[in-house]
Image (tube, grey):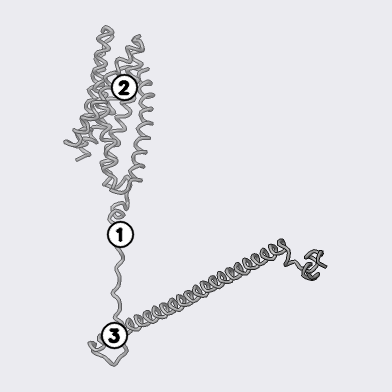
Amino acid sequence: MPNESSDSFVPDDLASSPLQSPSSAAVVSTSSTEADIVSHNHGRSNHEKNSILSQIISLSTSNGRLQQQLQFEKQKATSLSADLRDAAERIVELEKEEWTAGSDKPSEAVSLPPEPPQEPPEPPQEEEDMKGWGFRDPRLRPFVIISIAYLLFTVTDGAIRMIVLLHAYHKSFSALQVALMFTLYELAGVFTNLAAGLMGAKWGIRFTLIVGLCLQLLSYGLLFGWQDGWSDETAIAYVTVAQMFGGIAKDLTKLGGKTVTKLVTPEGKDTRLFRLVSLLTGWKNSLKGVGYFLGSALLEVSYELALGFMMGLIVLALPFAIWGLD
């Protein structure tokens, strides 16, 4: 009929088909794009896998080549070692043949000449020098002589301090006045040490030891002149000067006692040197204490007896220093 709509002429199967809808077309297009992307990514991942596998195969091949080269070098080194060993054996054989050709009996078995007897090694010079090293050894004679003189002097050095101190106390001198009497005794040591070193280097230890003992005799002799009737000022000045000679004598004698230990000790035997120094120092300190008690005890008997006894000890030490040392 002429008045009917154009839609009535569209077939039912075409009217219900999704291709005729715009939204359906868009969905189909999107699905197609995603499929292309997935396909592209799958192809790319396969390419990367193939590349990695190729690299692994290449590294494995390189490693195998390196192993083969290393094995070849080891075989080469082994072959060189064998060649060197053969060459060494050949040289030994040639030497034996030359020695056999020059001998009188070439047919006999070759034997190496006997080694000459080895002499026992000579002991080091230091050990020879130190055999029998003791106080009876003649090399220790200077040490023994100087030590005896120094230790006897030490008794008198300790005694003179107590004799002057206690005798001044009996004469009612104050503590400050007694201290003044010992000022030059201590100050003399400051300058004497330098002078004693120069004297010892120029004239020897024997000279300084004898001078020290003589000055100690002079110091004790001057103390004999201490008079009771003098004023305090005169007595202090006199005793201070007398004590000054005692201080000089102390450091001159000490130079010999401390130096001889080094002179009699061989080079490189520091342990023995330390033993000698410790022995001498211990005896010195002990005998100085003996001098304190001995001087005090003798002073209780008589002032002159105390001085005379100490001078006798110095006279006893002088012959050792004069005739016992070169």
Residue at which label 2 appears: 160
Q: What is the number of callouts on the image?
A: 3
Where in the figure is residue 74, as x and y percent of width and height?
Answer: 42, 78
Instruction: Identify which residue, 40 or 116, lies in the foreground.
Output: 40
Residue found at the far bottom of this picture: 107
Question: Which badge, 2 or 3, comes first in the chain's sequence?
Answer: 3
Say what amino acid the circle numbered 3 marks. Answer: Lys
Query: Residue drawn at (34%, 12%), measured in percent from left and top?
Result: 176
Say what amino acid the circle numbered 1 marks. Answer: Pro
Say what amino acid the circle numbered 2 marks. Answer: Ile
Query: Residue drawn at (39%, 78%), measured in percent from left and top?
Result: 77
Task: Say whether residue 3 is left or right of residue 116.
Answer: right
The quarter holding residue 98 reads bottom left
Query: Residue drawn at (34%, 17%), measured in percent from left and top?
Result: 165
Question: Which badge, 3 or 1, comes first in the chain's sequence?
Answer: 3
Mark on residue 123? 1
Residue found at the far front of this picture: 2
Q: Quadrant of the N terminus?
A: bottom right
Secondary element at tag 2 = helix
Q: How much space separates mark 3 and mark 1, taking CA atoms? A: 38 Å
Residue at which label 3 appears: 96
